[in-house]
Amino acid sequence: MSKLVDERGRPISSARAAHEGADYGRELATWHPGRYSADGELLDEADTLTRRTADLVRNNGFASGAVQMHVDNVIGSGLLLNAKPDRRALGLKGDDMAEVMDDLEDEIESKFDAWAEDPGCYVDASRRSRLSGLLAQAYRTYMIQFEILATAEWLRRTGTPYRTAVQMVDPARLSNPPGRSNDDTMRAGVEMAVLGEPVAYHIASHIMGDMMGVRGPVTWQRVERETRWGRQKVLHVFDNDQPGRSRGKGSITSVLMRHRMHDKFARVSLEAAAFNAMYAAYIKSSFDWTSVAQAMGAKLDGDENVLMQYLKGKTEFHRDGHIKFDGVRVPHLFPGEELKHLAPAHPTPAFNAFEEAALRYLAAGWNLTYEQLSRDYSKTNYSSARASLLEAWKFFNGKQYLIGGWFATMVYTLWLEEAVDRGAIVLPPALPDFWEAKAAWTTSDWIGPGRGHIDPLKEANGAKVWYSMNLETLESLAAEKGRRWRDLLDQRRQEQRYADRIGLDISGVGGPTPVQQPAEQGEQRGGGPQDQPAQQEVA
């Protein structure tokens, strides 16, 4: 009895695979993806991916808006330092030195803000941006080129006692020098040790092919990752989502093709609609030119001016044959002519439905909700809007911590090291010094833009309940509004002091205590959202 065998001579079973995804039936017969390492799947295609993403963001309104949406929600107007030295790691217990540490944290935040947001822009080596601007620029670069690259500089400049400065670098400049191919010790400009840890970065003098202000050939500079005592010299931030990844990769790469196809379809549809609307009407004549010529008594054999005579007659008629009634012009057509109107029609009647479905798919690639990407809130009520925005907020918080906060912490660590060494910040002598417990002294949180509210009264009432149950703190509630809790209390004290000085009672400024509100139209307690537009929910 004969049997079917594969290329290795093994019998081919007719039974279906245990997993449908592993079956080689008709639907999956041609699906044979390869297996790649993190760098193997990316490095050869990274330049193409970043160039196409940059072009898309430059020329596509939805892509440009998506990047701005990310920057607004992750960075906003900047990240506020909330200095939180790890007191337990420093050997403190309970209320040991509590007031000293409170004052120290307040001093660190104040002096860091003064340096980071100095109008002289000393935090920026090129002196073009304050730290808030650098963070926005860094995160925008991350969205388009999937990573952030900068170098720590040591500069002597008038106007500031600090020499620490940050030089932003285009990640496209990070590349292998000529003659060096990717291997276990060098990958896309990142020089690595035995265990894969970066030890140096090779940065080109300018981007290959860019002739804007370029002098001379491209050269490469080798910059070590850190000094011998551990001060960071290169700041390289990206999503390290797979073992062995040495360069960044963005989630937008999964929808680049769909984005391009949607852009092309929308452009073609717009051009077709514009073409259809160019001609509002036309004139139709029931006579062919030979009949007209015979009616005019022209000879058809060899008479080349028949058509010209006809056209000249029509022209003179339309120029001089206007009829007016009470000052209003009345159209009068040439004999045999008929006026036809065109009704402009969209070339693809299902365009709106198609675009909505396409934008929902693209929103998933951008990690945004459909409403955020499309700016269409017409089909959203309170419950569905809050549910979707809470999911988006989780993503933004994660990026704020892993990307924005990571980069900001690197800058803060560089500054604090110099501030302690310079004596601008004096640490308590009873505690470990900065270099002995660097990680403990630089522990911090970063406060981003406020979350915002869909229904402020409902959410304020919820915050009060959580706070009363000791499940929220003033620090966390203030952070949700993009503020430091110490700044809030200091501002309240200043306002109270000024009110007392001018004899004004502001004890009741807070207004009435929030109370439970009845369900709004389109919303059910304990149920899902109803199909009511958001405009009808507002009382």
Image (spheres, rainbow, N blue to C red):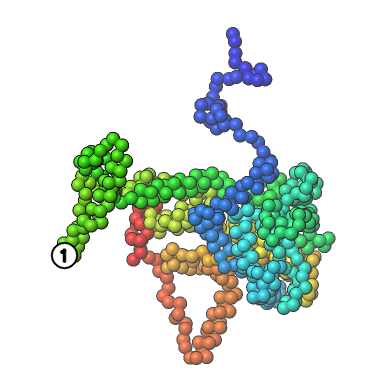
Q: In the displayed structure, would residue 195 be above or below residue 404? A: above
Nearer to me, 446 or 345: 345
Amino acid type at mark 1:
Asp
Nearer to me, 352 or 450: 352
Nearer to me, 346 or 527: 346
Q: Seen in the image, is 219 located left or right of residue 140?
A: right
As drawn, which residue projects farthest toward the bottom? 502
Which corner quadrant of the image does residue 154 belong to? bottom right
Q: Residue at x 79, y 69 (%)?
A: 433
Q: Position of residue 13 (x, y in %)?
A: 58, 20
Q: In the displayed structure, would residue 20 be above or below residue 518? A: above
Q: Is residue 260 visible?
A: yes
Q: Residue at x 21, y 41 (%)?
A: 297
As drawn, which residue projects farthest toward the right? 228
As drawn, which residue projects farthest toward the top? 1
Q: Residue at x 73, y 76 (%)?
A: 160
Q: Position of residue 55 (x, y in %)?
A: 57, 52
Q: Which residue is mark 1?
A: 326
Q: Seen in the image, is 85 located left or right of residue 316?
A: right
Q: Seen in the image, is 22 located left or right of residue 453?
A: right
Q: Position of residue 269 (x, y in %)?
A: 41, 47
Q: Residue at x 16, y 62 (%)?
A: 325
Nearer to me, 97 or 117: 117
Q: Seen in the image, is 337 located left or right of residue 403?
A: left
As drawn, which residue projects farthest toward the left? 326
Q: Position of residue 289 (x, y in %)?
A: 27, 40
Q: Is residue 442 visible?
A: no
Q: In the displayed structure, would residue 508 be above or below residue 449? A: below
Callout 1 crowding tier (Cα within 10 Å): few <14, some 14–19, many ≥20: few
Secondary structure found at label 1: loop
Quarter of the image with the N terminus is top right
